[in-house]
Amino acid sequence: SYELTQPPSVSVSPGQTARITCSADALPKQYAYWYQQKPGQAPVLVIYKDSERPSGIPERFSGSSSGTTVTLTISGVQAEDEADYYCQSADSSGTSVVFGGGTKLTVL
Amino acid sequence: QVQLVQSGAEVKKPGASVKVSCKASGYTFTSYGISWVRQAPGQGLEWMGWISAYNGNTNYAQKLQGRVTMTTDTSTSTAYMELRSLRSDDTAVYYCSSGYLYFDYWGQGTLVTVSS
């Protein structure tokens, strides 16, 4: 089955830049999306179509794509950004949705 | 504003069925589909499938084919997800969300516990 691969954890100090990667073969053909999830809450869409930011999402969140890897970048990380982050895309046929395993962002 | 309000927590025995509802408001219900995503305790997100609120077309995750049925009631702007032959590993928070290939609005989640 199709899989998206994320690192299990990333740690940064406040004010630094956090980068979370997501890799899969079909990513050059399918858009990637990123969600933030805090404990006990539903996920929140923070990036869509690789690099677009929904209204209300701070400008410090950005997304990029290069080949089979997409990256979520959080510039000037704040304590409130500590959460689990999930990438999401579709298989090459576009019919099956898949999530990455999630990355726990720790703000030191 | 768009709101998706789900039904309350359920406790079921193995082998039983559960039906979770998701009532939408704040937009034209038939303009978008509803997807269902679940999350087992301490685990990641798992896509379960999608239903078009316009014509009822469905697309289920292969893993759940034969056990899941998604329906909608356009008269009440409500979507339903029924999961049958429940097992302990179906214990999870079940979320509804607007959208097909990505999910911009989410319900609050419904905890389904499967235990004997």
Image (cartoon, rainbow, N blue to C red):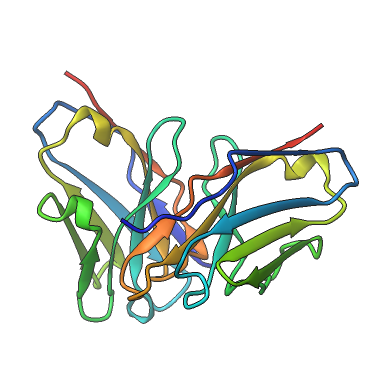
Q: Is residue A64 above or below residue B80?
A: below
Q: Quadrant of the C terminus of chain B?
A: top left
Q: Is residue A74 above or below residue A97?
A: above
Nearer-the-camera pick, B16 or A67: A67
Q: Is residue B23 above or below residue B58?
A: above
Q: Position of residue A88 (x, y in %)?
A: 49, 60
Question: Residue visible at 45% across and 54% down?
Answer: A99
Q: How many marks?
A: 0
Question: Residue visible at 88% across and 47% down?
Answer: A16
Which quadrant would residue B66 be assigned to in this image? bottom left
Q: Is residue A76 left or right of residue B66?
A: right
Q: Quadrant of the N terminus of chain B?
A: bottom right
Question: Residue visible at 72% across and 63% down?
Answer: A57
Nearer-the-camera pick, B73 or B96: B96
Question: Residue visible at 40% across and 78% down?
Answer: B28
Q: Is residue A6 left or right of residue A92?
A: right
Q: Is residue B6 left or right of residue A19?
A: left
Q: Is residue B73 left or right of residue B99?
A: left
Q: Residue furthest right?
A: A15
Q: Residue furthest top?
A: B116
Q: Position of residue B50 (x, y in %)?
A: 29, 65
Which quadrant would residue B59 be assigned to in this image? bottom left
Q: Position of residue B109 (x, y in %)?
A: 41, 45
